[in-house]
Amino acid sequence: MSDNGSVMRASVSEFPLVSIVTPSYNQAAFLEETIQSVLAQDYPNVEYIIVDGGSTDGSMEIISRYADRLAWWVSEPDRGQSDAINKGLRHSQGKYFGYINSDDLLMPSAVRAAVEYLESHPDVGMVYGDVEYIDAVGRTIRFYKSSAFDLVELVRSARNWVPQPGSLIRRDALDDVGGLDPEIQYNMDQEHLYRIGLKYPVAYVPVTLARFRLHQESKTVSGAERNARSEVLIYRKFFERADLPPSLRSLRSEAWCAAYLYAARACAYGNRRQLALGYVSKAAIVFPVALLSRAFWKACLYALAGESIVMRLGLVRCLPAT
């Protein structure tokens, strides 16, 4: 028995250690399924950390059932999701690091696929893949296929097509750029991605790595106004950087316009039309050329009528193609 154990330990040690952190707060309805998806990875060397924000919904009992399979866990008040992930990062030892929210799921071979790519591309700082969108009970909504990384276009458009679930970051890159910004509570992965992309290649693998859950309690669906404020904060911090290359600094006005239009649509989604109109106005002021774009007038429609009405009546079809 001891010989078999030694062989197993030797074989596991040949695989680089991967650290996965799950931040959680009152997500008992989904937490256990998330935990199981991490523990079921076919990659043999994963340290799993759970950072709970002091849940009162039975999450503690769920975590306790898996305590002997966790590298570390804690349940205590924190300053939000970014703070929780950073806390887990400080307790992790892996060569590669990732996090999965407590309502999302990793595909069984997600870690293996990401590690294989990073091991064969030592210059790459981060790798990401595709995701499957699911509803509250796990039914497939649609598959999302991402595309190659392009920091200039990401910043210019304020669109983030890089799925966070399933992504892995090289520890050396993390040590260089730092963890998540605790001041940013929405789209924190976008801000972190910008920092990584400024210094390291970021790679896309066309493999479904995770299942991303959309439900009424998820931050993706709720908190539209805070989502908008976070986007504006991300762009303020980004363009305050002294190390931006000319190719990015020259996009300042156009990028700010895109960020304001994103914020406008987020507020419209949350039925905060007054705020949405304010962001639309800021977009026009910072980049007047936007008045000629379909994206600008689409945001106006959402701000004036609300996204649900616009979609139901098909008003977007009335806009010019350019």
Image (cartoon, grey):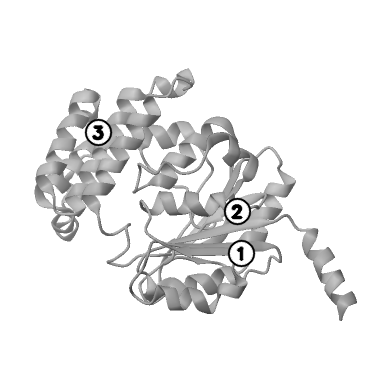
Q: Which mark is residue 89?
A: none
Task: State left or right for residue 185 relative to residue 306.
Answer: right
Q: Is residue 317 visible?
A: no
Given residues 32 and 275, the one toward you in this image is 32
First in sequence: mark 2 vs mark 3:
2
Where 232 sits versus 12, above or below? above
Q: Which mark is residue 71?
A: 1
Circles 1, 2 touching at the beta carbon (< 8 Å): yes
Which amino acid does the dot numbered 1 rest on? Ala
**Residue picked out by circle 3:** 293
> What's the distance in space between the residues labelled 1 and 2, CA to CA?
8 Å
Label 2 neighbour load within 10 Å: few <14, some 14-19, many 20+: many
As helix, strand or loop, the secondary structure at mark 1 comes to loop
Which is closer to the viewer, label 2 or label 3? 2
Which is closer to the viewer, label 3 or label 1? 1
Circles 2, 3 touching at the beta carbon (< 8 Å): no
Which amino acid does the dot numbered 2 rest on? Ser
Residue sitting farthest toward the front: 76
Name which residue lies at 52% across and 40% down.
149
> What's the distance in space between the residues labelled 3 and 1, CA to CA?
51 Å
Given residues 187 and 56, the one toward you in this image is 56
Task: State left or right for residue 56 relative to residue 268.
Answer: right
Label 1 neighbour load within 10 Å: few <14, some 14-19, many 20+: some
Which amino acid does the dot numbered 3 rest on? Ser
Where 282 sits versus 58, above or below? above
Q: Which mark is residue 92?
A: 2
Given residues 199 and 248, the one toward you in this image is 199
User: In which quadrant is the C terminus drawn?
Assistant: top left
> What's the distance in space between the residues labelled 2 and 3, CA to CA?
46 Å
x and y, in percent, of residue 241 in the image: 42, 24
